[in-house]
Image: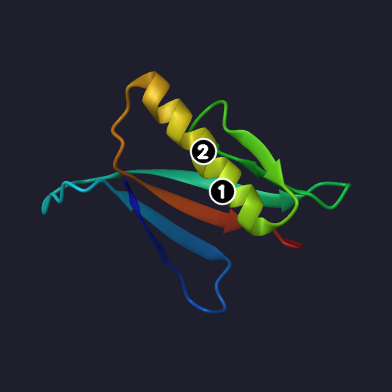
Amino acid sequence: MSVIQVNSQPSDKRHEVSFQTNEYRKTILRRSYSLILQKDEDGRIVVRSPDLQGVVTDGADIKEAIRNAIEAVDVIVEVRGLDKDYNLIIIQRPGV
């Protein structure tokens, strides 16, 4: 099971989400991946990651889009054999 932590300022459009497995490690440098949220012409929230090729998903609202993006990142991280402890930096484009 992972712990999700979201760090952001109330008026900030940039959020950082951290994932940690049950094993706590004090001195670890986690890889960070950016997720960019923007609205498409149909009003859906599209999420792309410039850091992880293949992460492109969407949702009816921000919560659904982020949930789908987290699932996509998890799959790609596992398939590529990357470290499962990582940070997600969520960037909202204007209009989201």
Density class for disc 2 (Cα within 10 Å; few <14, some 14-19, many ≥20) is some
Question: The disc labelled 1 sits on which kind of residue?
Answer: Arg
Q: Residue at x 27, y 45 (%)?
A: 30
Outermost residue toward the right? 42
Q: Secondary structure at mark 1?
A: helix
Q: Residues within 10 Å of mark 1 (few under 14, many from 20)?
A: few
Q: Position of residue 31 (x, y in %)?
A: 32, 41
Q: Secondary structure at mark 2?
A: helix
On the image, the x and y values in percent for residue 41 come to 88, 47
Q: In the rendered structure, find residue 80 and report the number of the disc placed on it.
A: none
The three-letter code of the residue at mark 2 reads Glu
In this figure, which residue is indicated by the disc labeled 2? 71
Distance in Å between CA atoms under marks 2 and 1: 6 Å
**Which residue is the site of mark 1?**
67
Which image quarter: residue 17?
Answer: bottom left
Position above or below: 26 against 54? below
- Give the position of the C terminus as an image quadrant: bottom right
> How many numbered dots are placed on residues in this image?
2
Q: Residue at x 21, y 48 (%)?
A: 22
Taking the spot 84% from the left edge, 53% from the top edge, the residue there is 43
Front residue of 92 and 80: 80
Evaluate if marks 2 and 1 touch, with contact meaning CB atoms under 8 Å apart.
yes
Q: Residue at x 72, y 62 (%)?
A: 94
